Amino acid sequence: MLRMTTADRMTAVVLFVLGVAMAAGGWTMDRLEIRQIHPASIPGLVPIILGILLAVCAIFLWRSTLQTTEAENEQVMADGSWLRLVLTGGICVLYALVLVGALPFIWATAAFVFGFTLIFSWPDRKNKLVAVAVSLLFGIGISYGISALFEHAFLVRLP
Amino acid sequence: MSGLIDLGNALWTLLTPITLFHVAWSMLLGIFVGSLPGLTATMGVALLTTLTYSMDRDTAILVLLCMYVGAIYGGSRSAILLNIPGTPASAATALDGYPLARSGRGRYAMGLATAGSMIGTLVAIVMLVMIAPPLAEAAISFGSFEFFWLAVFGVVISGQLTADNKPLKGYIAGILGLMVAMVGSEGIHAHVRFSFGFNDLNAGIALIPAMVGAFGFAEVLTAMWNRRGVLAVTEDKSDRSLPRLIDLWRYKFVCIRSGIIGTLVGIIPGVGEDIGAWASYAAARKTSEEPEKYGKGSQEGLIAAETGNSAVVPGSLIPAITLAVPGSASAAVLIAAFFIHGIRPGPLIMIEQPEFISTIAAMLILATIAMGIYGLSLTRAFIQVLKVPYAYLMPVVFVLCVIGTYALSQRIFDVWIMVFFGIAGFLLRQMKYPMAPLVLGIILGDLLDKSLRRGLTLSDGDLTPFFTRPVSACFVALIVLSILFNLPFLRRAVLRLFRRRGQDA
């Protein structure tokens, strides 16, 4: 299982790289000399400072992992269900990034709500046919209700 | 006195049937959102903001405030009955509320929580009316130098106070938020930064999609990941839910002190209701005559926590309205909503819209009354609400996250931003990075960037005015001291230095 010190060290490396990249990005950014701006107001100034600060914080974060005692070194993401997380993340990302835009909103939403509800109510329902019927009705009802609300009440052109 | 007259006038103007209707539904929705573990106040306000685009200014602000007040209060329901705070703000409430419910006094505990929340909000409304106008006037004299340090102060203090055990993680979250704000066209020369050739990034990353992701989608993932609690099944033996006046009178000092502490915590940028509740709870415990009862069903502890977290709501609006610096994560969304509805929060608010602060106070009073009515009359109904299965609730929340962010500017790119911030927010939260400084960084990034470069241009590149102007110097001192005493090795170094000096002397 992933321990907090390991997670912190991995994050520290990512943050350090991000900080250096940001500082480098700020340093190489156009200084708009052609527009004769004041040299102290170059657009890259704050990104340089933030990049350096993040890199310094990343070093401190790494250092802090060296002083962590065994009692403080708790497990990361240990107290939950990976299956539920992966299923939730997968369905939600599929809906938001693929279905919305590819299908009319009302159908994409009906499919998503039906799928989500069915998967997570499946273990609790003894009669599986009822689970499918309830999820289907719920999916269509919610999809129609939300679509109508945004389209007619808030005048949003749905994706 | 004139403040009270303005407040009376604002209240009178608001008392129309349609306003009361809006208060009624939005408060009910707020309490519903707050009661359900997994739905937070910030998420509720962010999602509701996306539903207010077509409303007029006052109605939109009113429903958002009712959602905010209702959700913070509603969190106490599940804290008392399930031992799971409906929102992080109610974590301290659970300590004494749940034992009271287990001993069969759940309804009375909810009544006490309602009374505490009402008193807390009212104390903070009085402070809002008293503090906000002079603060706005004082802030008119702020220049770029002061605003720069104010932004730094906000991120540092928020990072420090909201981090679980390592302030460093709070600082990192704050810096990440500031970095997000660096993307897109900057405010002085309109130069586009870090867009990597994506035209959609030219305008920067909008706050609402980022917040809906960090507080909406991330909450959906967290809720599905965690296990749910068990309802306090003991038969309820409370004879009443209306708190006895003698109980409230006994705790009058606790109520007022917790209200003041909550308001002051609210004023500190980015430090939210949870800290307000813990600070009030700790203060009450320290001065209590029966501290041994705390954590085992103390009525005093329950009232202190609930008064403290509710007082943060009006408190957090004080800097949000007068300085455009949010006092809590939910207040950050409210600032975004203010801009969407044509209100420009900041020091000029007292000149441009002098009636605005009284209007907000009047709205909060209406919200408090509605909270009291619902809180004392619907205790049984809320128990049913807590039984809504996640399988049905969470897909609806996520659909609202998607369509709400899309509706803001009708582009799919915002939905991608929401998904990115949802996943990043979930991972960061699992690794104990607080979300409030991240949000504060996003909202203060522009102010910090513009103030620093404008200040440097004014002083011709000279850094001295950043340290010598009186208000700037105070901010610098506060920031340096708070950082010094929270980085362990620096703290040890400072202590060693003092010890050595003591020995030399």
Image (cartoon, coloured by chain):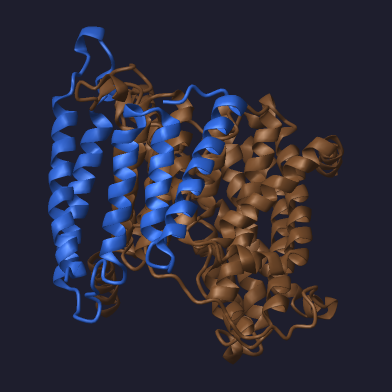
Chain colours: A blue, B brown
Identify the residue at image location x=38%, y=43%: A112
Identify the residue at image location x=68%, y=52%: B28
Residue B381, horizontal then vertical, whole percent: 69, 65
* A150 with respect to B489 (left or right): right
Quarter of the picture holding the C terminus of chain B: bottom left
Q: Quadrant of residue B169?
A: bottom left
* B362 with respect to B214 (left or right): right
Quarter of the picture holding the N terminus of chain B: top right
Between residue A94 and residue A71, name the one nearer to us.
A94
* B293 with respect to B170 (left or right): right
Between residue B302 and residue B52, name the one nearer to us.
B52
Residue B159, horizontal then vertical, whole percent: 38, 55
**Residue that extends furthest to the top in the rendered view of this protein:** A34
Q: How many marks?
A: 0
* B393 with respect to B493 (left or right): right
A123 lies above or below B327? below
Identify the residue at image location x=62%, y=28%: A153
B396 lies above or below A98? below
B469 lies above or below B108? above
Identify the residue at image location x=19%, y=79%: A69
Residue A113 in view (yes/no): yes
Residue B431 in view (yes/no): no
Residue B413, horizontal then vertical, whole percent: 33, 28
